[in-house]
Amino acid sequence: MRISKTRAAGLLSTLAIAAIALSACSSSGSSAAPGATTAPGATISGGVTTAPADTQAADAGSGSGLGDASGAFASIKSYKFSMTLAGGSFGSMLSALGGAGATGAGGITISGTVTSNPAASDIDMAGMRIIEIDGSDYMDLGTGGFIKTPQTGSSLADGFAPSKMFQSSLGTASDYKKVGSEDKNGVKTDHYQASASAFAGMSSALGVTNATWTADVWIAQTGGYPVSMDIVASTSDNSIAYEVKFDITNINDPSLKVTAPTNVTGG
């Protein structure tokens, strides 16, 4: 089956727009009031959070905040990642992809390699492979051949790389509290959990009501960048209303490289 350049460019545009919309929607969570002592896993309904009094007391008084974990991504020269997105507005992305790669409650999986020099990425998204390098996008929709299109504006990787998903899905960074230290993906990290108030504004923007939010983030002790994130909003019947999970590995591995494909087909 031959895929035209027009269709390939259209899919890229659809996904890029979806990424921008999700980022804008999620960033509304940054307006949530910081410093609340509601414990992780509290219930949000109509922007109001509640939790047992004993968990509120236990949460108070511990160190809070993630610092500039988002900005620390810039210090990483290369990494591999795996990601799961489900619920919320991610369903519209799955529809744009024709339903390919669905997992669980309408979720999608994304994995790939990202490098900073050169700035490039090789991403497998719901069965579709996209390589971005030297100002061009190369898309394979499962045919074994790539369609080449020039990048216009923000690239797809800008919207769906872990660095962007972390920044746009985090909620209020000051509402995270350190709960321990442990090895994660071969890296010494500090483990943080969020109070439910971190997602009060985000919950409303995403249309997620009467959901229980849990959020865990693992930050590298050296470098301060996120190594893993697990954010889930589940309803009373345990269905997933919203989910963003990612892990990064092979951090600063000099053997990681992204190259332009040679099997580029015509439009």
Image (cartoon, rainbow, N blue to C red):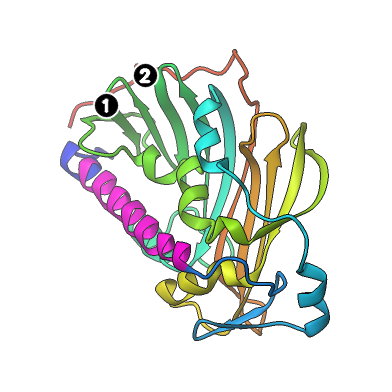
Q: Give the amino acid at mark 2.
A: Ala
Q: x%, y% of residue 148?
A: 25, 28
Q: Give the distance between the C-alpha atoms of the residues marked 1 and 2, in whole angstroms.
A: 9 Å
Work out which quarter of the rendered image holds the C terminus and state it.
top left
Q: x%, y% of residue 24?
A: 35, 59
Q: x%, y% of residue 195?
A: 66, 68
Q: x%, y% of residue 19?
A: 36, 52
Element marked by disc 1: strand
On the picture, is 175 further left or further right than 140?
Answer: right
Name the residue carrying label 1. 136
* Residue depicted at 83% across the width and 42% down the height: 182
On the picture, is 28 further left or further right than 195?
Answer: left
Name the residue carrying label 2. 260
| Above or below 79: residue 234 | below
Work out which quarter of the rendered image holds the N terminus and state it.
top left
On the picture, is 235 further left or further right than 33?
Answer: right
Which label was assigned to residue 187?
A: none
* Residue depicted at 50% across the width and 57% down the height: 169
Residue 18: say if magenta: yes
The one nearer the camera, 43 or 139, is 43
Residue 129: say if magenta: no
Secondary structure character of the magenta stretch overall = helix
Q: Quadrant of residue 223?
A: top right
Do the residues bearing badges 1 and 2 touch, measured as CB atoms within 8 Å?
yes
Q: Which residues are magenta?
A: 9-31
**Closer to the N terminus: mark 1 or mark 2?**
1
Element marked by disc 2: loop
